[in-house]
Amino acid sequence: MVWDGTNRANWRRSIVLKIFLICFVCIHIPLIALLLNFGTGTGSDAWSIGLVVLGATLVGTAACLAAMWWLTLPLRNLASVISRYRAGGVFAEEQLSKYGNDEIAVVTRAVCGMVGEISALAERVEGQPALDPLTGLLNGSAAYSVQLPYFPSDSVGGTAITLAVFELEGIETLGARHGRETADLALVAVGDVVRRYFLPRQVAARMSGTTFVLLFSGDTPDAVFACCEAIRKSVAELEVGPLAAGSLRVTFGIAVRQSSEPIADLLHKADMALFRAKDMLRTGLETLRS
């Protein structure tokens, strides 16, 4: 590394240099006091020399501790503010010292900036569903937060709500053989397939690594099965990187909402249908209703 003017300026402002200088001076205070004692000739017997060294040592120790306490005070304040913020409190930025050019000041300003950006991002996405970064569909948390009473139900308008859960099979061995990148590309392709056949419906989610959820509101049973069958065939025909057609396949489980069932109960019914489909239909290419 080139030792230029910028590096010298940063080194002079560094808290490490301040600590080094303080420790160096405090450690040598007894020696300085001893030299002054000999130079002035105020006392040369062992008792007076011992008192001078002891007093200078105590003064140097106290000065070193006080200086360290003062230098690290901004860091302790930062740690305290972060701890209260993580516990659910307010980020008390006004209690922090953000001025200066040493390492603690730089870290403090960076933390304040990051907390501000996170808060602004949280405000922008508040109330909006979170998206899975690979497929572009909703994530599991967003799917569980769907309020089914806002959808037409059997008891309200005679419109059925159907939930389809499908599992993408073969991706575990895919990741082991071809690497994580190929597995991620396969998930991206499956997300594209879902959007192609599921739109303009709104609720499609990736619940976990290989499990997806589709919520049909107002679709007839024939339309639901037709959509699922189209997704199944398209996934089976996918060619992603080194994958040949037929390497990926999906199994569906379908549940129809009864009365005012919450989303969690409906997901459980669809999961049970999916498990039975996988047990009874070993090809993994079939659909089973609950």
Image (cartoon, rainbow, N blue to C red):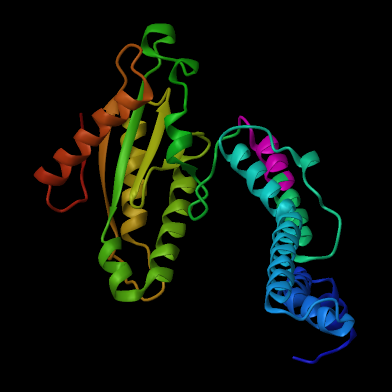
Specify the quadrant of the image occupied by residue 100.
Answer: bottom right
Q: Residue at x 78, y 75 (%)?
A: 25
Name which quarter of the figure residue 140 lies in: top left
The image shows residue 229 at horizontal and vertical percentages of 31, 44
Whether residue 23 sits left or right of residue 244 in the image: it is: right
Q: Is 126 part of what is drawn in magenta?
A: yes
Q: Which residue sits at x=67%, y=42%?
A: 81
In the image, 57 versus 43, the foreground residue is 43
Q: Is residue 151 above or below residue 12?
A: above
**Residue 239 appears left or right of 111:** left
- As drawn, the residue found furthest toward the bottom would be 2
Tell me the quarter of the picture where residue 108 sits.
Answer: bottom right
- Residue 110 visible in the shown view: yes
Tell me, yes or no, whether the highlighted magenta stretch contains residue 160: no
| Residue 288 in view, yes or no | no
| Farthest-out residue, front | 45
Q: Quadrant of the C terminus?
A: top left
Q: Nearer the viewer, residue 76 or 151?
A: 76
**167 vs 259: above or below:** below
Chain part drawn in magenta: 116-127
Per the picture, the main secondary structure of the magenta-coloured stretch is helix
Quadrant where the image shows the N terminus? bottom right
Q: Is residue 182 above or below residue 46?
A: above
Residue 21: x, y in percent?
A: 78, 75
Return the x and y of residue 23 as percentages of the image width and height. Answer: 72, 72
Residue that appears at 69% across and 63% down: 58
Q: Nearer the viewer, residue 135 or 180?
A: 180
Asked if 33 appears above or below 196 in the picture, the reply is: below
Residue 174 percent location from the top left of the image = 30, 68
Q: Nearer the viewer, residue 115 or 68?
A: 68
